Image: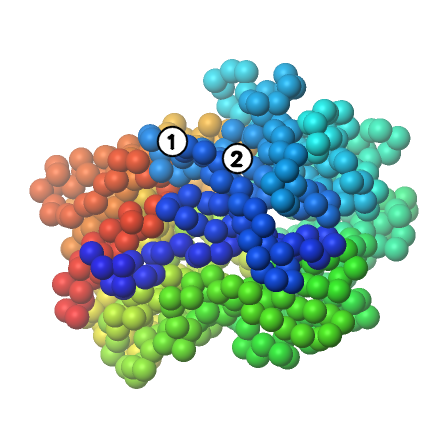
Amino acid sequence: MSATDPASLFSRSSEFTQVQISPAGQYISAIQLFEGKRLLIILDSTTKKLLHVVNFPGKAQVGDYSWANNERLIVQKQYLKGWSIEPLYYGELYAVNADGSNDEYIFGYKDSSSIRGTAYLLDPLLNEKRYALIEVIPWSSGSGKRSYSSVVYRVDIYNGSLRKRAKSPIPYPVYLTDNNGQLRFVSGSKDHINSSLFYRQEGEWINTDKFKFNLQNMKPIAFSQNKDEVYVYGQKNGQTHGIYLLNIKTGQKQKISQDSTVDPNNVWINSNNKKLYAVEYEKGYPEYEFIDKNDTYAKHLKLLLTSLVGHQIHLISQTRDADKLLILAFNNRNPGDYYLFDTKKTKLSLLFSRNKWLDPNKMADVKPISFTARDGKTIHGYLTLPYGIDAKNLPLVVNPHGGPHGLRDYWRFVPQNQLLASQGMAVLQVNFRGSGGYGQAFEELGYQKWGTDIQYDIIDGTKDLITQGIVDKNRICIVGGSFGGYSALQSSIIEPDLFQCAIGMHGIYDLAMMFDEGSISDKYAGQAYLKAALGNDMNQLKAMSPTHHVSKLKAKLLLIHGEEDTRAPIEQFEALEAALKKQHYPYESLLLDDEGHGFYKDEHQAQAYRKMLSFLKTNLKL
């Protein structure tokens, strides 16, 4: 198949990602894909001459990376194994100078330490040339449920010697360090639902519960001028999350920023002083609230927003003195362009485009929408409309997002939706109740309602477009991955005459099975989450599981799954397949034996897209 066919074009991974500038501004680095492997390229920032390439031999590739000082980088080493196309990370950290010299494994199999665990860079300690902080999650010694606590070490980035600094007092920790590399705050959760915040005092972690801040889901994000104060992300009484300033000496709490509809989508921190300067929200289109309008970075961001009109701007890397910034500009039609911004000369230069083979001017528009659900609740979402076609009587693909909890759809470039729109289809995304990003109360409305109220929102949004005359009621399909795959089947069971076809990709089809199979159930917090989100009423779980109700289906059916999926294991596909065969219900399928939860390899994604397009065109009569 030609590399220029639509499925190949929209499944092709971005050519450049994770673009960074070194602290002194001498080098620009980026991850580049070459023959299916991730390489780290390092360029002279002035001449753009290639200086060095980090290319691990054999089946290894570069993972995440960061500059640790003006000359040295810390790089994760991943492995491409035959039984899984998705790369595996075992915790190895590799350090190397920008010119390729003085390379050394500083943590992992090849270092001299006896610590068995997976390491992640926590803080590069840019004020210390020789050291960085790493977070290590110890490997479980048994086969039981895992609890993810971690230990923080100071590591010598030239020889790998380690010194223990602290152990997290709670699983799934999120740390905040100050400019001196001191661990000051950590938050975490034992059940993915409730959280606690701790501060460091004389070498001990102190729980802030004693102050009765009455905030849930707290995460430390930035410091204030007062050493006893910290900005946190949190929420109370089921409301939307906000940004609060807490004083750990007096116990006082001050709300700094909050939107009544949506949670903060992003917080923007001055990397030099670790102070908060802006909060980003997204009710429909992205919006910025500037907390410190006089902050240097805030001024730069405002200028860039006016220079690149219609784009969302992310400041992704900068020099220590902020004379040069690397930014990513993107929107609903543009996957993203990387620019170098010289703040002294006020000059903006294009470096790389993430997907230069796609023309933003020919992509589809993504428009925020809202509608009233059957119980009066306002539900938000997005509608992708084909480029150059009137929005009347269009064929529609409904695309529910995964999760369902903690995730939502945004005003973004989504390759799959753009592919479908390029073939004349509209695409509906619904941020149904249970979605993240709209406050805790809204998210909890989806608890134990996976097969009912959540699906009603998806169905009501679809019917709203029919009422408006935007879509043809006789040409509607529903397509989703993960929880979206579940929704594709479940919505088709609830409203069998609404959808002409359904595609379930790496979906969950038997809810009770989630407690025994898959990566969620193998953690203590995962089991707690499942009990809260699904309940333990077996009759209710059966009532909401597509495997038990295939006799109600009328839609043409396509199932796509990876046999190495750990989140929605192949047993889920097999359970649905067995139920379909028992009912003699016809279906098509595509199985890939070395793929996991979502397709990692471009060729496999293209293969799935071709199968999907053929199926949709047949059933939507395109």
* Residue under pointer 2: 77
| Mark carried by residue 81 | 1
- Coloration mode: rainbow
Q: Which mark is residue 17?
A: none
Taking 598 as reference, is 103 above or below it?
A: above
**If the image is split into quadrants, where does the N terminus sit?**
bottom left
For the C terminus, give its image quadrant. Answer: bottom left
Residue 594, percent from left and from top: 30, 36
Give the residue drawn at x 61%, y 62%.
47
223 over 328 or under it: above or below? above
Crowding at mark 2 (Cα within 10 Å: few <14, some 14-19, many 20+): many
- Identity, as a three-letter code, of the amino acid under mark 2: Lys
Q: Quadrant of residue 525?
A: top right
Closest to the observer, 589 or 489: 589
Q: Is residue 188 left or right of residue 142?
A: right
The image position of residue 194, as x and y in percent, is 63, 40
Could you say whether the residue bearing mark 1 is in a helix, strand or loop?
A: strand
Residue at image point 20% right, 50% down = 558
State the separation of the CA atoms marked 2 and 1.
13 Å
Q: Is residue 264 left or right of residue 369?
A: right
Residue 111 appears anywhere in the view: yes
Classify residue 255 by image quadrant.
bottom right
Pointer 2 with pointer 1, Cβ within 8 A: no
Count of marks placed on residues: 2
Q: Amino acid at mark 1?
A: Lys
Q: Nearer the viewer, residue 436 or 343?
A: 343
Could you classify mark 1 by the number of other residues whose Cα lies within 10 Å: few (under 14), some (14-19), or many (20 or more)?
A: few
Seen at 29% across and 81% down, the residue is: 389
